[in-house]
Image (tube, rainbow, N blue to C red):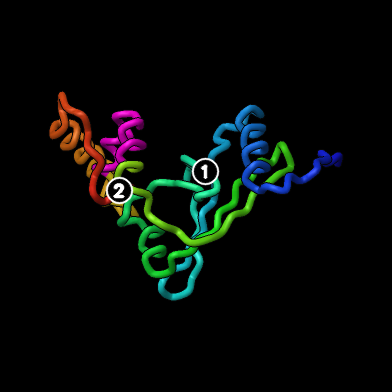
């Protein structure tokens, strides 16, 4: 196996930006996918895929329903780790640190940029709950499509 050579940048954020741009141009289905790991009240770790939505020296941003397991875990233990893995490039990035909620303005701006179906989905999906049926979810989607018909979909208070 021939591993690509590189000279690490002294600034880890510049290195991340360089590698992230390469990953975005390398044909990955979802180069922003990252595994976020949290720890719940019993000390048990939990991992799931989320999408990286912003990054820089101030942090790495993802959005979630505040009722989700990850949000509940973060409420108990406000630290997490994340891994972005770009297998074709033989690269991974690991980050860890304190998790903080972004401002309402940032959440509103990102939420308004999402496709309408994703906005409706945020209102409709009872995060981390077992659904009785797929029909239940489609009915909720219908309810919120009707509720927000002919108007912008506002960001729910439980999402950011």
Magenta span contains residue 119 = yes
Give the left or right position of residue 119, taking residue 23 as reference: left
The image quarter containing residue 16 is: top right
Residue at left offset 19%, top offset 39% = 139
Q: State the image coordinates of residue 74 (x, y, percent, origin top left).
A: 41, 63
Secondary structure type for disc 1 = strand
Would residue 76 appear left or right of 149 to someone viewing this image? right
Toward the top, the furthest residue is 150
In-front residue for pair 113/56: 56
Question: Magenta segment, principal secondary structure?
Answer: helix
Asked whether 88 or 152 is in front, the reply is 152
- Return the residue nearer the eye: 9 or 120: 9
Q: Please check the rendered image and state whether residue 66 is part of the magenta-colored stretch, yes or no.
A: no
Residue position for label 1 = 55
Q: Residues within 10 Å of mark 1 (few under 14, many from 20)?
A: few
Of all residues shown, which one is farthest toward the left?
Answer: 147
Q: Residue at x 48, y 64 (%)?
A: 79
Look at the image and give the residue range highlighted in magenta. Answer: 108-124
On the picture, is 137 further left or further right than 78? left
Q: Secondary structure at mark 2?
A: loop
Q: Position of residue 130 (x, y in %)?
A: 31, 55
What crowding class fits label 2: few (fewer than 14 Cα within 10 Å), some (14-19), or many (20 or more)?
Answer: some
Mark 1–mark 2 distance (CA, rounded to whole Å) = 19 Å
**Residue 73 placement (x, y as % from top left):** 40, 64
Which corner quadrant holds the N terminus?
Answer: top right
Q: Quadrant of residue 17?
A: top right
**Residue annotated with mark 2:** 159
Number of marks in the image? 2
Of marks 1 and 2, which one's residue comes earlier in the chain? 1
């Amino acid at each position: 196996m021939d591993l690509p050579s590189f000279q690490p940048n002294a600034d880890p954020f510049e290195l991340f930006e360089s590698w992230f741009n390469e990953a975005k141009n390398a044909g990955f289905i979802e180069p922003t996918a990252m595994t976020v790991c949290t720890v719940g009240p019993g000390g048990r770790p939990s991992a799931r895929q989320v999408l990286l939505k912003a990054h820089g020296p101030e942090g790495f941003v993802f959005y979630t329903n505040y009722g989700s397991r990850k949000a509940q875990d973060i409420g108990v233990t406000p630290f997490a780790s994340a891994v972005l893995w770009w297998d074709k490039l033989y690269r991974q990035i690991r980050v860890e640190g304190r998790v903080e909620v972004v401002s309402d303005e940032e959440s509103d701006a990102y939420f308004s940029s999402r496709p309408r179906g994703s906005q409706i989905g945020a209102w409709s999906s009872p995060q981390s709950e077992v659904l009785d049926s797929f029909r239940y979810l489609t009915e909720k989607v219908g309810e919120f499509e009707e509720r927000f018909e002919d108007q912008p979909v506002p960001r729910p208070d439980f999402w950011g």
